Amino acid sequence: MELIQQNPDIEAYLAAGEVVDHEHPLVRAVSDRLADEHPDAYSYAEAAYVYVRDTIPHSMDSGDLHVTWRASDVLERRTGICYAKSHAYAALLRARGIPAALCYQRLTEDDGSDPVVHGLVAVLLPGERTWARQDARGNKPGVDARFSLGEERPAWVVRPELGEVDYPELYAEPHPAVLGALKAAPDRPSLGLTLPSEL
């Protein structure tokens, strides 16, 4: 699948903002700690991925009721759904000057029902000509997502026959439907009822 930059200016994928707030002291502190042990961009990108995937539980797996959406809040509260964890991973990448984009899939149940949009991050590492999508959602039985610059290793591979979709667009900021759902939800169970079904 060919990924499409929504913004032709690569600097957009390095910018700090309300959601990907990589200038926040907590984001910087986590980034600095990871970079101390992983000084080159490649090992840092993988270490940051593993950190978000493995040390910040997916709130639907853990039962946490909080809704997080700002990267610094995800790192502080140590919880979030796939979108929030993607924001945290993107912030850790951008904090080290590594372009990071937000991207999405549309997934369904095994019978094609209950579609929902799933969030990922695409990274563009130095010397690479193509973006590589990463899924920091968090593993559980039946889910084995891995950091990979070659063949993708997401939590789920789309099944077009069920109406599932890999959206090719690379966003510098969260899609409005995603951010709107996160901001409007008073708690995680409510969010579960209002997740976008398509983009």
Image: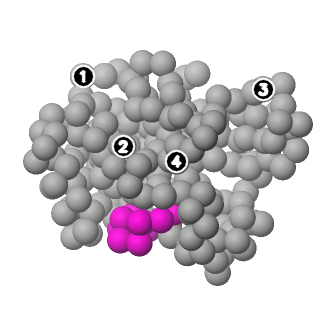
Residue 174, horizontal then vertical, whole percent: 53, 56
Disc 4 from disc 3: Cα separation: 21 Å
Residue, disc 2:
49
Q: Kindly report the distance in space between the C-alpha atoms of the residues bearing marks 3 and 2.
A: 27 Å
In the image, taking residue 56 as reference, residue 104 lies left or right, namely: right
* Foreground tag (3 vs 1): 3
Circle 2/circle 1 CB separation < 8 Å: no
Residue drawn 72% across the image and 64% down it: 192
On residue 137, which mark appears?
A: 4
Identify the amino acid type marked 1.
Gly
Residue, disc 1: 127
From the viewer's perspective, is 170 left or right of 163?
left
Give x and y (percent) for residue 149.
Answer: 38, 24
Q: Is disc 4 in contact with disc 2, using a CB cutoff of under 8 Å?
A: no
Amino acid marked by disc 4: Arg
Reading the image, the residue beneath label 3 is 160
Between disc 4 and disc 1, the foreground one is: 4
Q: Main secondary structure of the magenta part?
A: helix
Residue at 36% across, 43% down: 49
**Separation of marks 4 and 1 at Cα, in angstroms:** 26 Å
Do residues under tags 3 and 1 come within 8 Å of each other at their CB atoms? Answer: no
Q: List x then y, in percent, for residue 143.
A: 59, 37
**Which amino acid does the dot numbered 3 rest on?**
Pro
Residue at 60% x, 74% y is 65
Rendering quarter of residue 103: top right
Q: Earlier in the sequence, mark 3 or mark 2?
A: 2
Q: Nearer the viewer, residue 134 or 155?
A: 155
Query: What stretch of residues is rendered in magenta?
Result: 70-80
* Kind of element beneath mark 2: helix
